[in-house]
Amino acid sequence: MGAIILCTAGLAACAAKAPQASLAMPPPAEPPPQALPALTVAKRLSTMPPVAVPAVLRPPLDLSGRNETGKASYYARRFAGRRTADGQRFNPHAPMAASKTLPLGTVAKVVNLSNGTSTTVTVADRGPNVESRMLDVSPEVAIRLGMIREGVTRVLVEPITIPEPDGKVKLGAGAAHASKAQIAAAIGTSRRVMRQDGIRVADR
């Protein structure tokens, strides 16, 4: 009986001296990279030189948000009531434009480089069907830009909001110089056009 007690005590002692396996703790996970705030990206885009739109009928779609330069013309009033690419009726008095490169629903500031006047447009159509031109604007926009007499003028296009294929709305270079109210209004306009086109709009 005493031997059994000694043996048991010995096992307990041996067990107490046995090295304990240490559990290696995994290194702390790297924090996910934080996306640059949208307005910071817009400000960076605004410092880049404008892109010259190729003088072709169908240049590639531009989702970069960078400024663009090229020639603009304006619609004849006889097109009033015709369907535009976004499915709406063309209104000569609406602040709209046709672009070869910007997605439908893009809201952009357009600057007439010959006189410095500017206004904001929504891209609602495709065109112009002239290789040397990048933008068609409504007669109302042409009046605001002071280009009625010339008919064709060089412009700078500063995208404020650009609809993306995944349903998100991206801020472009023009947002860097827009007020919060202007940006909010532009986002709302872009989302409305996207919904009209059957695009599922992302929450952010």
Image (cartoon, rainbow, N blue to C red):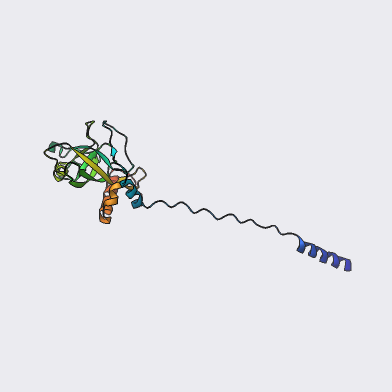
Q: Is residue 77 above or below residue 34?
A: above
Image-quadrant location for residue 132: top left
Residue 117 image position (x, y, % from top left): 17, 46
Where is residue 16? Give x, y as percent: 76, 64
- Residue drawn 22% across and 44% down? 110
- Toward which corner of the image does residue 105 lie, by quadrant? top left
Q: Is residue 153 left or right of residue 32?
A: left
Q: Position of residue 30 (x, y in %)?
A: 51, 53
Left or right of 27: which side holds 122? Answer: left
Foreground pick, 201 / 171: 171
- Residue shown at the point (25%, 53%) measured from the top left: 182
Foreground pick, 199 / 92: 92
Q: Residue at x 26, y 45 (%)?
A: 158
The total number of labels drawn is 0
Q: Quarter of the image for the N terminus: give it.
A: bottom right
- Residues 115 and 8: in front is 115
Name the spot of residue 154 as percent of width and height, x first.
20, 38
Q: Can the viewer see residue 172?
A: no
Can I make out residue 189 in this image? yes
